[in-house]
Every structure is written in structure tokens, then in C-alpha cells.
Image (cartoon, rainbow, N blue to C red):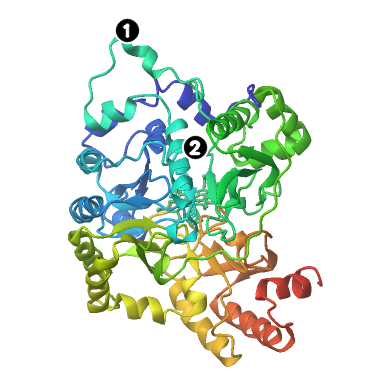
Amino acid sequence: MAGKNNLSPVERIKKESRGLRGTLKESLKDELTGAIREDDQALIKFHGMYQQDDRDRREERASKKLEWLYSFMIRLRLPGGFMTPEQWIGLHHIAGEHTTGVIKITTRQTIQVHGILKSHIKPTLKSFNTLHLDSIAACGDVNRNVICSAHPKQSPIHAEIFDYAARISAMALPKTRAYYEIWLDEQPLKAEEKQKEEDPLYQDYYLPRKFKVAIAIPPNNDVDVFANDLGLIAIVENGRLAGFNVAVGGGLGTTHGNSQTYPRLATEIGFCEAGDVLLKLIYTIIGIQRDFGNRSDRKLARLKYTLDNMGVENFKAELGKRLGYSLKPSRAYRFTERKDYYGWQQNHEGKWYYTIFIENGRVLDDEETSLKTALFEVAQTGKANFRFTTNQNLILSDIDPRDKAIIDSILVRYGIIDYTRDAGAVRRNALACVALNTCPLALAEAQRYLPSLITKMERILEKYGLQEDEITVRMTGCPNGCARPYAAEIGFIGTSYGFYNLYLGGDRLGTRLNKLYKENLDEVAILKELDELLAVYSRKRKENETFGDFANHVWVNGK
Ligand code: SRM
Ligand code: SF4
């Protein structure tokens, strides 16, 4: 185990946790505080939850000599991002009863709900359980929600890919029954049943850090496959899924001022056939990260650092040794887009799909649309499934041709069709992370700020005739990269309240990272820069040249 002589504090917490139980039961019982014990704050992540507080109310609480307003965020495990209408109805009620009410679609194709008081965690998880939904391993040092290309119209092999997402997720679940015992009141296993918890993959120290898997179906790289620890690119030959190109070592998080940290796109290491052999391969790669990952410095613990420390060839050799064979060479494929297909689309089986634009994935009723009410009504018809995209949008899916008109009429009545159609090109391709007021790591706003910045940016785009240009703009409140800003054509990364670093030159397909262009810009400075950059781009770009490509050769490499 790398770094075993100087283990980070989280390593001790995991090891001593008795299968991720820690003192969570005791923490829950403590009515004197809305928080849980410190060690349990690390463990609760493995159960899909984070302790947070309302950062907007810190000063007010302090002035009243009250502790911070603690609450919990729950993130569901939804491989491939799918829910039935019944599950959406249940989620709608749970969100209303126990949370802030906002349903948040994340950049990893799942759902988060915020603002859950400690005493509401168990009822919330029990309600999710009755819907056959759980939050196991949605966070923590384990394999996270497995994402895959979202739209079934994309390819006849979509159903197979979706199935792989579910199988990978199930294979890499921790074996401990702690979630069921603590949150769902399951009886602890008897001594003679304890072997059911034996966990050859995670053992009792789990992974050094989170681990992320994505599956893309070319030509669309909607999942940003290279931003993952393990990216699988489906290879379709003669209309059949032949297997996957395997890419390892992607990850975006960095830390301001720590030059040892960096974003990295995954490196392709070969091809693997479809079937059980793929699952074995994934299991083995996770095992290598478990054994070689850095356990003393969590900032340097992701697979990307393990890979760079080992060297790609040594990593491949270790993989070959453990598998007993070497991967075949990668096969040909091409990404030509990275986007969601908005509006009505039909798949090869004649089923209909409507992709709704949801700004930053926030499902709520506000002055612009009654989106939450509309989706509830759609779910009540029972005639559409719900699929989430990694661009924080929602696909009403698998709609029978004879039911299309009913769904359409609901969407029309609530103005959703107009809202989706009228969203400008930059807005509908933009991403922002949660940031304030719940994210404890946020240095600046993101989802609460980007919409208004885009409105101002749209005026500039219009001035230069660029309003139809689908430039990808992504913003995060800190350098952790939750909205994948390093893989955008224009990335904004918060440095302090109201200030952002500006990154330029990523490509539109997610195959080239951007680079830092200007530091610590406030809104006035951002708009000035954008005005100058877009003016030059509109005048000097070659035909069909994207902003990212232009910026890359003029301002990033040409500097
Ligand atoms: Fe993230 C931590 C939100 C996708 C890299 N991320 C966090 C936390 C949990 C803050 C914390 O540790 O206390 C944020 C909770 C905010 C809140 O109040 O809800 C948070 N991350 C999110 C979400 C909800 C952003 C969104 O608006 O959609 C996404 C949830 C994904 C999911 O459903 O599982 C989310 N996070 C990502 C992505 C994008 C991706 O995976 O495609 C990344 C970059 C890719 C990567 O992992 O490298 C990402 N999040 C991080 C990191 C940096 C990790 C690193 O290697 O350095 C952190 C901080 C950490 O882990 O210490 C972090
Ligand atoms: Fe929070 Fe930073 Fe992630 Fe945004 S990028 S959600 S601010 S950790």
C-alpha cells in the first residue's frame, strides 16, 4: 500500500469503522447538535451523504450564538441515470417533505437533495428504499455512480450499455450491510453470517480516494469520458457491440496554489471485449488503484497520480500480470459531438424522447417555469420514464407513439417546450456546479451566478453575430472541477467571492483540456475580456473553427 507509513487521518477512520458503521448510530441520537461526530462525517459519505450547513446563514447564526444550521445532502446511486415515473413521484414527495424542495440533477447523471435535518435522514432513506432507490457508495472512497451516454435514440446498443452501467455499479458496491443496519433498521448479521460482508475488493481500507467510471457511445462524448478514472468507449462493429476501448487516469480536481495537483484526461490503454471479461478488467484496475494509490496525501490520491507515478507502461504491465493477458490495441472510433439532444427525438424502435433543458439541473417551480409541477404531472400519467444526463438535463423517455400527444400537451401547458426551445446556444450547453450556499468548499458562486453572467454574455455574442455558436462555458465555485470546467472552451473557476480564473482553449469534444488565461477576474473584467476575445474570434476565425480551437492556437499556444 503506497504511503503506508504516513497514512492520512481518513485511512484510520475507514480502518477502524467496523464496515463503515463508526459511531453513526450514536451521532444520530445526539439531540444537542444538528451535526454528527467528526469521524462519522467522513463515514457518512460512503452512505451517499454529506454534512453541510447553510452558508448564507452563518453570520446570522453566529450573531445569535447558535451553531451553524447543519443539514445533510443525499446523493442517489442511479447507474446510467434512470427512474420510473413512480420513483419520480416518490422523489417529488420526499423532496417536499424532508428537503429544501429543489431536486438537483448532477453532472454525474444522478439526483441530490439538500437541507435534510439529522432527524429526517432515516425517514428520507426509508422512503427512498420503498422506491427501490439507495444512496450507497454515491460518495466516499469507492466506485461512484457509473455514468453512460444518456440518450437511447443514440444507438441500438444503448440498452446494452445502460445494462453495463448497472452491472459495474453492482459489482463495485461495498459488501458491508452498514447502510441497511443504520438507516433501514436491518438486524445485524449473526456471527455465522459474517462472511457475507467479506469484501475482497475494498477489504477494510477501501480505496485511497473516489473512483469514477463512465461509458460513452461514439460519436457523442456527452459523458466526458476522459474526465473519469476509468473511461470506456463503446466500439460498435457491424451494428454490434464488439467491446470497449479502455482509458484510465482521468480526473479534474486541482487545488489553488498546489502545483503538484493538475487536471488530466484519461489515457487509452487498449481494447477489451464485451462481457464478463470487461467486469473482471474493471475489478482489476480498481484493485491496482487500491494497492498503489497514495494513502498519505488525499490531494494526490486519485488514479491519475497513481498512473503518472507508475508510468503508463508499468501500469499496463501490472494490469497484464494481474489479468494474465495483455489488452489488445485500441480500435478506431470518432467523437464528433458532446451534447444533449434537446426536444423531441425518436429512437430505432419508434419510441419518443423529449429532452428538457434544465438550467444547472435545478428542478423547481420559479417565476420562469413551473417545471417541478409539470414533471410531477408527467410522472402521474405513468407514460414516460425519467433519464438524467451528465449535462444536468432530463429526458422524458420511452414514450409510446400513442402517448406522445399527452406528454406534449403537459409540456406545452407549462411552457416547457418554449423554455427549452428558447434557451440560447451557449446557455443550453453550459454547466455550473452547486457551490454556494451548500458546498463547504465553494470559494465563489456558480449555479446561482452563471445564468445572469450568460445573459450578459449573450449581448456580446449577439453583437458579433455569434448567438448560434454552441461555445461550451462551464463554471465552478472552486478548483475541484465538479462541472468539468477544465474540459470547456471557456472555463470559470472561482478564486474568492466574486472572482474567477478564466481558462481558454479546451475543445468542444472533451478531448483537450483548456489552460489558465487570466487570473482573478471580477464580472466587469470578465465581460471586458469576453468582449475582446469574441470580437477577434468573430473576425479572424476560419470557417467552422470553434472558439475553443481558435483560442487554443491564438491565445494559449500563440502566447
Ligand atoms: Fe464534485 C466534492 C458536488 C461532480 C470533483 N462535489 C464535491 C462536494 C461533495 C463538496 C464536498 O466534498 O463537501 C460537492 C457538494 C456540493 C453540494 O452542496 O451539493 C460536489 N460534484 C458535485 C456535483 C453535485 C456538481 C453538480 O452541480 O452537479 C456533482 C455530483 C456528481 C455525482 O452525482 O456523483 C459533482 N465532482 C464532480 C465532477 C464531475 C464528474 O465527475 O464528471 C468532478 C470532476 C471530475 C473528477 O472527479 O476529477 C468533481 N468534487 C470533485 C472534487 C475534486 C476531486 C479531486 O480529485 O480532487 C471534490 C473535492 C474532494 O473530493 O475532496 C468534490
Ligand atoms: Fe463545491 Fe467546488 Fe465542487 Fe463547486 S467545484 S460543487 S464549489 S467542490
Instruction: Locate residue 13, reporting x and y percent.
Output: 46, 26
Helix, strand or loop at mark 1:
helix
Across the whole image, how many numbered discs are drawn on residues?
Answer: 2
Question: Decide: marks 1, 2 in contact (CB < 8 A)?
Answer: no
Q: Can residue 435 be seen in this view?
A: no
Q: Is residue 2 left or right of residue 200?
A: right
Using the image as rendered, state which of residue 220 and residue 261 is in the foreground.
220
Instruction: Locate residue 71, reporting x and y percent.
Output: 30, 47
Helix, strand or loop at mark 2:
loop
Instruction: Locate residue 78, reporting x and y percent.
Output: 38, 46
Residue 57 position (above or below residue 543): above
Q: In which quarter of the image is the C terminus?
A: bottom right
Residue 80 position (above or below residue 35): below
Q: Can residue 60 be seen in this view?
A: yes
Instruction: Locate residue 355, reporting x and y percent.
Output: 39, 67
Q: Which amino acid does label 2 sit on?
A: Asn
Label 1 crowding class (10 Å Cα cut-off): few <14, some 14-19, many 20+? few
Query: Residue 51: which disc?
Result: none
Q: Is residue 496 left or right of residue 322?
A: left
Would you identify the image quadrant in which residue 526 lies? bottom right
Q: Which amino acid does label 1 sit on?
A: Glu
Q: In this view, does 259 lie to the left or right of 289?
A: right
Query: Residue 192: which disc?
Result: 1
Q: In which quarter of the image is the N terminus?
A: top right
